[in-house]
Image (cartoon, rainbow, N blue to C red):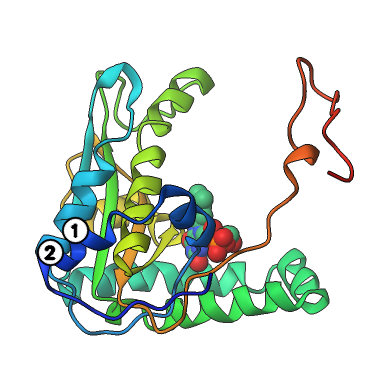
Amino acid sequence: MDDALSQTSDPEEVEARLAMPLSEAMLTQRSVRRVDPGPVEDRTVLRCIELALQAPTASNAQNWEFIVVKDQAVKAALAAQYRRIWAIYATLGRWRSRAARDDREQRVMRSVAWQVKHFEQIPVLVVCCLRRGPWPPLLPKPPLLASSHYGSIYPSAQNLLLAARSVGLGGALVTLPLWSTTLARRALRLPLNVEPCCIVTLGWPKGRYGPKPRRPVGSVAHLDQYGNRPWDGPA
Ligand SMILES: Cc1cc2nc3c(=O)[nH]c(=O)nc-3n(C[C@H](O)[C@H](O)[C@H](O)COP(=O)(O)O)c2cc1C
């Protein structure tokens, strides 16, 4: 099911592509980091964000904010953070030894390295943020609150990725450029009660969508209690 769709700015064509069967979008959506620097229409980006908003949020708070970054200076500020953390991350022993063993890991490493190097040339970065309630802005949340807090952004980010995939845009979810929330806040002029959580990068792909390796369902599905895996093994 490898698929490289051509670029389009035609809203009718965008709508037609969004009718892709859900299972096909899910099966072929993967991190597409290598993208063309050419522009993506604002209305296409907004349509994808509009679909992202169909996701659930805790207490239906809809406390999300999406910063659509196209400005070079803002991208450069986020790219600088990505480069800083990647320089450390890429040299971590675990990554290096895994990558040395595994072809796929090596490909992922190369594709992340490409993205880090060309981050400013990615046409659109959608920074997915959450507005915080009365909890003191800089205090970490206790686990239960943290779970429902951050759980309010990732379903929308996944919807955004699926919408992008259907349209034929290359998308990838990244968090490393936001490792310093202080610097990210400064670059994006976010108030203290708005927290940057992740970025969905968007552009017309240089590569292709297609299947990706995943663990078999029986190895992760437990019946009633942890460890009881009757579906594990050959189908
Ligand atoms: C919470 C989260 C953070 C991630 N952060 C990054 C990142 O900073 N940079 C990056 O290149 N990929 C990042 N990824 C993408 C994963 O590396 C990727 O989804 C994974 O390797 C599986 O590959 P696939 O998306 O192609 O199936 C992140 C994914 C998640 C869910």
Image position of 194 (left or right of 155): left
Q: Is residue 150 left or right of residue 50?
A: right
Secondary element under disc 2, as helix, strand or loop, is helix
Rendered image quadrant of residue 15: bottom left
Q: Position of residue 164 (x, y in %)?
A: 32, 60
Instruction: Tell me the quadrant of the picture where the C terminus can be found.
Output: top right
- Ligand 1 within 8 Å of disc 2? The answer is no
- Type of amino acid at the residue the image marks with label 1: Glu
Between 176 and 53, the residue placed more toward the observer is 53
Q: Is mark 1 within 8 Å of ligand 1?
A: no
Task: Classify mark 2: residues with Cα within 10 Å, few (<14), some (14-19) or many (20+).
Answer: few
Q: Is 206 located above or below residue 128 in the figure?
A: below
Residue drawn at (40%, 84%), measured in percent from left and top? Answer: 206
| 1 and 2 marks in contact (CB < 8 Å) | yes
Q: Residue at x 32, y 34 (%)?
A: 55
Residue 112: percent from left, percent from top: 52, 74
Percent position of residue 182, x then y: 31, 50
Disc number placed over residue 213 in the picture, else none: none
The residue tagged with tag 1: helix, strand or loop? helix
Crowdedness near tag 1: few (<14), some (14–19) or many (≥20) residues, C-alpha within 10 Å:
some
Q: Residue at x 29, y 56 (%)?
A: 184
Q: Name which residue lies at 23% across and 30% down.
A: 63
The x and y percentages for residue 174 are 44, 59
176 or 56, which is in the foreground? Answer: 56
Residue where numbered disc 2 is placed: 12
Disc 1 from disc 2: Cα separation: 5 Å
Comparing 43 with 92, the one in front is 43
Which picture quadrant has residue 103?
bottom right
- What amino acid is at disc 2? Glu
Query: Which residue bears the numbered disc 1?
Result: 15
> How many numbered marks are there?
2
